[in-house]
């Protein structure tokens, strides 16, 4: 996957085969939201629907990308501190939801970590460990409480100087939810939406959980789910090694450094992919003990963590 992104390939593969009862199966694979996306649909007009699903993912990417000039997030980040920016209602609501999740996770989930992500620049060709004083300087600008949303006026305001947000930890989940709803509205009962390992299964499916630091598709366990999302966060997704230490893309907003909480990965299973996405990131930051308490304030979530010792632990929300 990294190789693909490195050489900037945008592949579109369309495979369609006729199945019994007049249903077809179509698979569309493309590069979007900084990752490989694959949508599999079984339906009479499967190809059309799979393509429609991909268009929906691209639509959300255009709103949520922090680097695409003109996107809602780009506009928010470009505005002066204290200036309200009008955005699409769905992005305003998504950012408001992020604030609620930050509050419930004691700030472990925080979209204002973006200045730190830019500093770490994990995806750079030759990433470096930043200077401690640069990390301290960026940390000052991390504060989810200074993101003010007005869902009636559909505005977002970053209240403090130098703040910036990224929806990198929730956008894939949000997109998976939107696509799942869209396909359900079209009457689809069997589909698999895979946005860089962020999964939504329509119908009954067995979803493998990625073995960290192994080839994509190597699984250490699997979960049987139905009409449900399965999302995993892990150090292995985007990382580099320096002096024997792994530095990765999930930032602990307390320290400004990649989170080290004793976990190799955190998987959340929920009907809400956006919640699963946000929580898997937060749990990876918080570690097993704290998370098992914190998830009790969330409904419809099952958690599976893989510890650095190789143990699998499972706990549920409310
Ligand atoms: P995920 O892959 O869903 O766990 O999200 C990780 C991505 O979210 C990173 O690549 C960053 O863009 C962003 N991010 C990093 N740390 C955090 C955090 N503590 N809270 C929210 N977003 C974060
Ligand atoms: Mg996430």
Image (tube, rainbow, N blue to C red):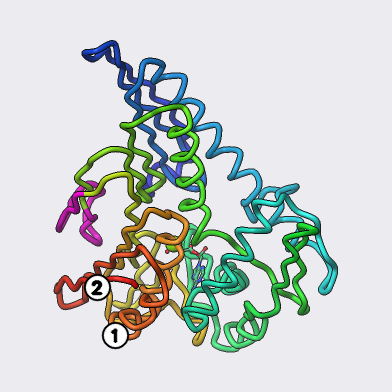
* C-alpha separation, residue under disc 1 versus residue under disc 2: 10 Å
Q: Quadrant of ligand 2?
A: bottom left
Is the distance from the Cβ of mark 2 to the nearest ligand 2 atom less than 8 Å?
no
Residue under label 1, please give it: 289
Tag 2 or tag 1, which sits nearer the N-term? 1
| Rendered location of residue 164, percent (x, y) | 68, 69
* Secondary structure type for disc 2: strand
**Residue designated by label 2:** 315
Quadrant of the rendering where the C terminus is positioned: bottom left
Q: Quadrant of residue 309?
A: bottom left
Residue appearing at x 61%, y 38% in the figure: 59
Residue 100 in view here: yes
Camera-side residue: 250 or 290? 290
Q: Is residue 227 above or below residue 268?
A: above
Segment tinted magenta in the rendering: 209-224
Q: Is residue 220 magenta?
A: yes
**What is the secondary structure assignment of the residue under circle 1?**
helix
């Amino acid at each position: 996957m990294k190789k693909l992104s490195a050489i900037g390939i945008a592949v579109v593969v369309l495979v369609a085969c006729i199945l019994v009862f007049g249903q077809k199966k179509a698979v569309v694979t493309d590069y979007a939201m900084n990752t490989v996306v694959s949508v599999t649909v079984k339906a009479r007009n499967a190809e059309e629907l799979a393509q429609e699903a991909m268009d929906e993912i691209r639509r959300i990417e255009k709103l949520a990308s922090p680097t695409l000039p003109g996107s809602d997030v780009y506009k928010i980040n470009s505005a002066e501190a204290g200036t309200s920016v009008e955005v699409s209602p769905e992005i305003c609501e998504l950012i408001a939801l992020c604030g609620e999740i930050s509050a419930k996770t004691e700030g472990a989930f925080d979209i204002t970590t973006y200045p730190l992500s830019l500093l770490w620049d994990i995806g750079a060709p030759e990433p470096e460990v930043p200077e401690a004083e640069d990390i301290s300087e960026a940390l000052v600008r991390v504060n989810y409480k200074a993101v003010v949303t007005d869902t009636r006026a559909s505005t977002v305001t970053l209240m403090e100087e130098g703040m910036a947000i990224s929806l990198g930890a929730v956008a894939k989940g949000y997109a998976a939810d939107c696509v799942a709803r869209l396909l359900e509205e079209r009457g689809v009962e069997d589909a698999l939406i895979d946005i860089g390992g962020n999964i939504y299964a329509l119908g009954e499916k067995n979803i493998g959980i990625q073995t960290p630091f192994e080839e994509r598709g190597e699984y250490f366990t699997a979960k049987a789910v139905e009409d449900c999302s399965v999302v995993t966060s892990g150090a292995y997704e985007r990382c580099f090694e320096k002096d024997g230490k792994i530095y990765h893309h999930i930032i602990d907003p307390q320290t400004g450094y990649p989170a080290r909480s004793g976990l190799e990965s955190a998987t959340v299973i929920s009907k809400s992919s956006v919640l699963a996405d946000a929580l898997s990131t937060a749990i990876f930051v918080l570690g097993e003990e704290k998370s098992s308490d914190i998830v009790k304030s969330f409904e419809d979530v099952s958690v599976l963590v893989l510890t650095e010792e190789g143990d699998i632990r499972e706990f549920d929300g409310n």
